[in-house]
Image (cartoon, coloured by chain):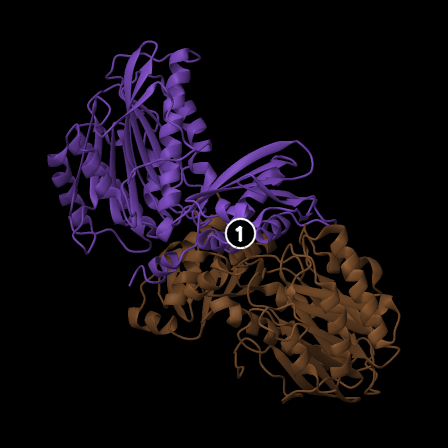
Chain colours: A purple, B brown
Amino acid sequence: MSFASRWAELPAHVTELPGGLARGFRAGGAACGIKPSGAPDIGLLISDEPDTVSAARFTRSGTPAPPVLLCRERSRLDALRAVVVNSGNANAATGRGGYEDAARMQGGAAMAAGCHEDRVAVCSTGVIGVPLPMTEIIRGIVLARDELSRDGDASFWAAIATTDAFEKRVTVDVALPSGSVRVSAQAKGAGMLQPSFATMLCFVQTDAALRSETVDLLLGVCVKRSFDRISVDGQLSTNDTALLMASGASGVLVEPETEDELRLGEALDYVFRRLALQMVRDGEGAERVGRVHVHGGDVEAVERAARGVANSPLVKAALHGGDPNWGRIVQAVGGALPTGTPLPVDVWIEDVQVCRGGAAARYDADALGDAVSGDEVEYRVGLPGEGAETEVFFSDLSYDYVRINADYTT
Amino acid sequence: MSFASRWAELPAHVTELPGGLARGFRAGGAACGIKPSGAPDIGLLISDEPDTVSAARFTRSGTPAPPVLLCRERSRLDALRAVVVNSGNANAATGRGGYEDAARMQGGAAMAAGCHEDRVAVCSTGVIGVPLPMTEIIRGIVLARDELSRDGDASFWAAIATTDAFEKRVTVDVALPSGSVRVSAQAKGAGMLQPSFATMLCFVQTDAALRSETVDLLLGVCVKRSFDRISVDGQLSTNDTALLMASGASGVLVEPETEDELRLGEALDYVFRRLALQMVRDGEGAERVGRVHVHGGDVEAVERAARGVANSPLVKAALHGGDPNWGRIVQAVGGALPTGTPLPVDVWIEDVQVCRGGAAARYDADALGDAVSGDEVEYRVGLPGEGAETEVFFSDLSYDYVRINADYTT
């Protein structure tokens, strides 16, 4: 799927490539029989550079899956060398046995990568509450190891996907003052996406040479502006993981607080926002993407109002139907911000102001009809005051979302 | 639609009647041209007893509609004699002009009822952001007045309905120690229903003689156990109103803290829960009703967990498909209760325990399949501790919900 969105613009010093991994990395995927369809379901990503540094973010769920717990407790998240991922089974709500299975995956991948176990991250995605088929998993790790290659990102991506309708993968070259570096990234996610840091699985590699503190800082900032600002269905997953790894294989050293760091940050920001927007666009049956921008009020109020709009099934259904029913925006904001006195809300859809001070504005109905008919629709909400602003990207609510989710396990 | 739910049982001292209003009340509805279909769209309900007492509950929305504001500011909510309701237009997000229109409705209904304006409640429901057609409204009030009758509850109900798929109306006789009283009730609501007090429009009448404090107490208790515990789509409306009126026309005096009050309370509880469950069952395209019961934790935790499950589109889609995907219950609870350490959640679907201490339990898959195939499905969630419990009733998420809401204004 070709990508174009006004909400993630390619910076001038960043060049898209059709694929391939950042230098120092190899990846591959294989089918080991977890998915009944026989599709690829296990992936391996490794760095050949011993000094690779990294950073990670995980779901905030109160019921995190065993692989998430294992990564937090047993992995050196600042120095990961390898990632093993299976799809088709989330290894979630699997208890002590699930934790032991995740540990065995970690051990198997460490052998395949030739590194210590604590430098391996383990991720799983798929159905909840079913034990992992460990014989298949271990066989799969061996198969995936045999597939490892410098341009194995497409094969790796296929192995981590579940209900994704299209590929979410990007490779870019970044011109820094100190030299050229590459960034590659693979992400999966369509449903069960909640606006929270580290939503879904996302793996990003660069061959820039970075300190681990810089990797952590860059990951944190990028996640806040991407996966933290999207919602398909307001659902926080048990397994969400985002990893950024830097091999240093380019030989280009990116020092903190330099023009190099700024430029690399801009490139990463583009990559993260692009992948996040692709997830929203994929959003299990989604056909349109909305952006709600809320300004005024205070930090908590804009956040609650934006989430209220983005997660309203009425707003999402209206987005699906290209229905200019702006009253639902007002209703969603009011529901998110219960107060004694009425809020004088302003609402714009694209550039058409439909509500002023809480009451209907005069507007051109044809212009409004055009405004809601595009693939991307922007809603702007003004609250009293000038304190804060935020944005959330969201999917529409379609028949296909229901179809996909009414019959997932059976 | 015949009504039967294990979650609202008819008390032994309560007898269902096919229809009719409590003594002292008359109601009627008419078509005045607000709805393009020509269906009835304006209703009037009045009490002929000058000493009628009442109580009211309204939406908590931060963007309440002008009629809600008017009722709060200008109506004697403890002594209402009349209610005027229009459907097809919510008179919401209409600003100062909307408030003046609501005041004109109040004045027109006061003339029709022969009482002071401050004893009239005004309600509107329908599309948001469009001015009321006041010529039609005033004409409609006159037409509805001519239709007023003691068995006008069906006609009144038809005039307040919007996307309702079936009638929500009940009349019961209640045997109290001091004599027999009647309770009649009419409610509308299918979508934009949020678990909050006073969700949708609901009008309840009794001919028992009550103090206004007792009416307020009974309404508060009943709303907490009914409309406060349902969710179709988690959406809080701008116009929700619940009114309880007592005419005293039966001559049966119900004193506080008596067996009479207790028995009348049980009857009202049945009426409110029945109407609330009918709303959930109607829930714009809904085919099934779920009940989630959460115990353990504390008051805030059980509330958040129950709302998290009831408003999860993944859980609702699974309910729609009769899909035994219990992992989504665990995911929804985890999303609602983000913590650092994993929650040892217990989950039962009907009587089948599927999750114990956060991990999959052994269960009979056939029994589970049967458990999720009924019209009503009960989910039970146990959190650590023994502090609290709550319940929420919710609709499934169907294709028809999307169809109905993707194209409502156009």
Residue drawn at x 81%, y 69% as measured from the top left: B108
Where is A286 relative to B276, above or below? above
Residue drawn at x 47%, y 61% as measured from the top left: B381
Residue A329 drawn at (x, y percent)? 58, 49
Left or right: B198 as drawn, with respect to A153: right
Q: Quadrant of residue A160?
A: top left
Left or right: A328 as drawn, with respect to B402: right
Q: Which residue is mark 1?
A: A324
Q: Quadrant of residue B345?
A: bottom left
Residue B406 drawn at (x, y percent)? 47, 58
Where is B36 relative to B313, above or below? below
Whether residue B280 appears in this view of the structure is yes
Tell me the amino acid under the disc marked 1.
Pro
Residue drawn at x 41%, y 44% as measured from the top left: A375
Whether residue B291 appears in this view of the structure is no
- Closest to the observer, A295 or B247: A295
